[in-house]
Image: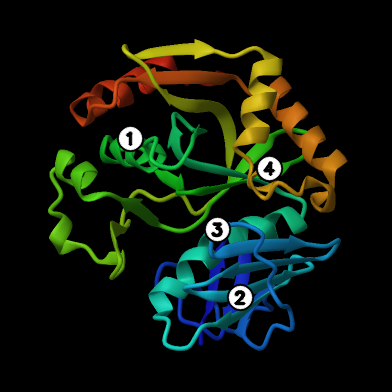
Amino acid sequence: MPNYSAYGLVIYSDLPFPELPATTPNKIPDVIIQKGKINWEPHRSGPTDSCCRITAKHVYFFWGHIGKVLIANGQTIVVDPCPGVPEAVIRLPILGVAFAALLHQRGQLALHASAVVVNGKAIAFLGDTGWGKSTLAAALHARGHQLLCDDVVALDFTEREITVLPAFPQLKLWPDALETMGVVPDHLPRLSTQVEKRRRPISDGFSYHPVPLGAIYILGMGPVLQIQRLSQSEAMVALIRNSHAALSRQLAYWGKAVHFRQCTDLAKQVPIYSLKRPKNLTLLSAVAELVEYNGHPAGV
């Protein structure tokens, strides 16, 4: 198997990952993904077929239709799939919540977001599932802006700045969003046979280098198209709610103090906006144009 790259990491995997760029085979990997037996019995307390367990150095996920995944020490992802599960289905949580967990273990802040590059700065879009993060990123990419991440945005904090680490060149989009942008959905592969969402590889217009973060938009629905800058306290609430650590509902083992400090630093250093718009794909170009207009000359 080849080595892959994502989020600035060299990844060796037993499983093929066509979504990830290949890198030099003889490089020492930062992360190893392998199949194996996971000695953990999931405890499901609710009606869902999924659960999660977090310890100081390990994160366990279980999905009844996929299997178990273990993330250890920011270095290893072990996959214990159910019999007969297609590899395309197994890859979905690994490239999503499993990688978010691994990034947190490595000290990065992972946000449930997508990001593009506008005028040399990374612009991230946060929001609940189905609120248009990927769609807006795709619209801006179609307008000539480089894609950085889709679904998981990893932030690296240094003394000088906060940067967005490049993920991999792919967008996940629903058929109606693709049609709005003039793309025929049937020409693209589904994420899985059970899901209508499509995988759109990005052959051009992807940034393979970290980019300084310029602004964050919290997406929401409203009667009119509107951008409003949030106060630091409002921004903090939004960041915590949209971080993958918060989504786990078990912050203590992620390093609670580090997580809150990162969110605080982010709210202080980077402008964070509320972006509300009607749920109408015909307004997509107008939303993308408003983001361009709102920003992001040098020094936002």
Q: Residues within 10 Å of mark 3 (few under 14, many from 20)?
A: few
Earlier in the chain: of badge 2 and badge 4, it is: 2
Rendered image quadrant of residue 221: top left
Q: How crowded is mark 2: few (under 14 residues within 10 Å), some or many (20 or more)?
A: many
Q: Mark 3 points at which residue?
A: 47
Which residue in the structure is indicated by mark 2?
68
- SS at mark 1? helix
Q: How far apart are marks 3 and 2 (CA)?
A: 18 Å
In this rendering, the answer to whether 38 lies above or below 92 is below
Mark positioned earlier in the residue sequence (1 or 4): 1
The residue carrying pointer 4 sits among few (fewer than 14), some (14 to 19) or many (20 or more) residues within 10 Å by Cα, namely some
Q: Name the residue under label 1.
A: 140
Q: Going from the N terminus, do you reach mark 2 or mark 1 first?
A: 2
Nearer to me, 277 or 84: 84
| Residue 238 place in picture, x, y as percent | 61, 27
Using the numbered discs, state the Cα–Cα distance from disc 2 to disc 4 in whole angstroms: 21 Å
Amino acid type, mark 3: Pro
Q: Quadrant of the C terminus?
A: top right
Q: Disc 2 and disc 1: Cα gap in Å? A: 36 Å
Which of the two marks, 4 or 3, is nearer to us in this view?
3
First in sequence: mark 3 vs mark 2? 3
Asked if one can make out residue 208 in the rendered structure from this viewpoint, the answer is: yes
Circles 2 and 1 in contact, beta carbons < 8 Å: no
- Amino acid residing under circle 4: Ala
Q: Residues within 10 Å of mark 1 (few under 14, many from 20)?
A: many
Work out how far the residue at label 4 is from the one at label 3, CA to CA, in angstroms.
21 Å
Q: In this view, does 30 lie above or below 12?
A: above
